[in-house]
Amino acid sequence: MVYQHENLVVCGVDGSEASLNALTWAAHEAASRGARLEIMCCYEERTYSKHVGSGAEGGGLLVERAKEVLDEAGALAAAIHDDVVMALEATDPTKALLERSKKAARVVVGARGGSGGFADRMLGSVASAVSARAYCAVVVVPTPHVEAVLPVKHIVCGVDGSEASRLALRLAIREASRWGARLSCVGAVNFAGATWLPGSEYHQEVLDDVRSGLRDMVEESMQGLDVDVRCHAIEGNPAALMAEFSTAVDLLIVGTRGRGGFAGLLLGSTSQAVLHHAACPTIIVPKRTSQNEDAMGAEVPWQRPS
């Protein structure tokens, strides 16, 4: 099914440092694309008279606290972006975020919250479910020092030649254009994990071939945009390389359901390794977005004029 996506960035918050950190990034992303920012907070219904939900030890927020969280989040976002709406939902965060992804351009969540609630679960069931099943790209923002990666100046996109990684590459080019950022496209060649190995004298030839194919993909995906793109073919484990890059750049972008390289990362333990160890925000591009907002073509309704 094809969904009509709006120029909308959705961020889930629960009052934790992680979720407010994610909100800071989401507000800047919304501003960069001239989008509306929706701040969503989920709460649980009181099940008995003395039920106290705070989100502090794995429980959900009650409605009174959720309203306070939204007020705090709204004030933070308003200092960055002027088109902000609030959403208070009596439902599970995963369900709410997945439903929002049917119309949003981005869903943004925090990681490593320390609260035990919504944000702490982002790298567990919530993050896995949202990143694997969303209808739009999902951004996972780690807790520390988000201001250090704003504005986005350098983006790394993992590419393995699959259709999923092509989707991620097209999105990465658009993100780089909006931010005015440099884009490094990386093809990883994991000789250690290969079932067949060429002789060591051929390793450089393989890397050169990968780099050449990567340049062809970039040229096909540029969509008429003026972006500073550099292509690299590197020997190594994709997850380890992405974790290393994340310490030196502002944003990672990867696709899902590839053929074993970067684009295949996010279906198992490797994907979790990337999300757990990434030091900068990571945009995950699910394969199902191929029919949605960041699919084909250069013209999208919210593209900023050059």
Image (spheres, helix red, strand yellow):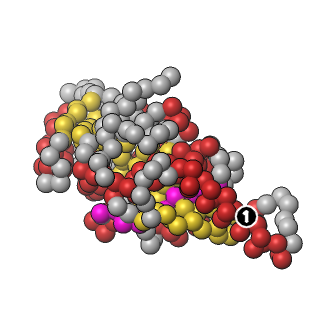
Q: Which residue is under mark 1?
A: 209
| Residue closest to the eye, 224 or 157 | 224
| Farthest residue, direction top | 1
Identify the residue at image location x=38%, y=55%.
177
| Residue closest to the eye, 10 or 201 | 201
Q: Position of residue 38 (x, y in %)?
A: 25, 39
- In the rendered image, the vertical position of residue 244 relative to residue 103, given as above or below: below
Residue 158 is a magenta residue: yes
For residue 193, say whether it is visible: yes
Which region is colored magenta? 151-160
Q: Position of residue 166 (x, y in %)?
A: 57, 47
Residue 267 is a magenta residue: no
Identify the residue at image location x=18%, y=41%.
84
Report how many numbered discs are placed on residues in the image.
Answer: 1
Query: Label 1 sits on what residue type?
Result: Asp
Q: Is residue 153 left or right of residue 223?
A: left
| Residue closest to the eye, 251 or 17 | 251
| Farthest residue, direction bottom | 201
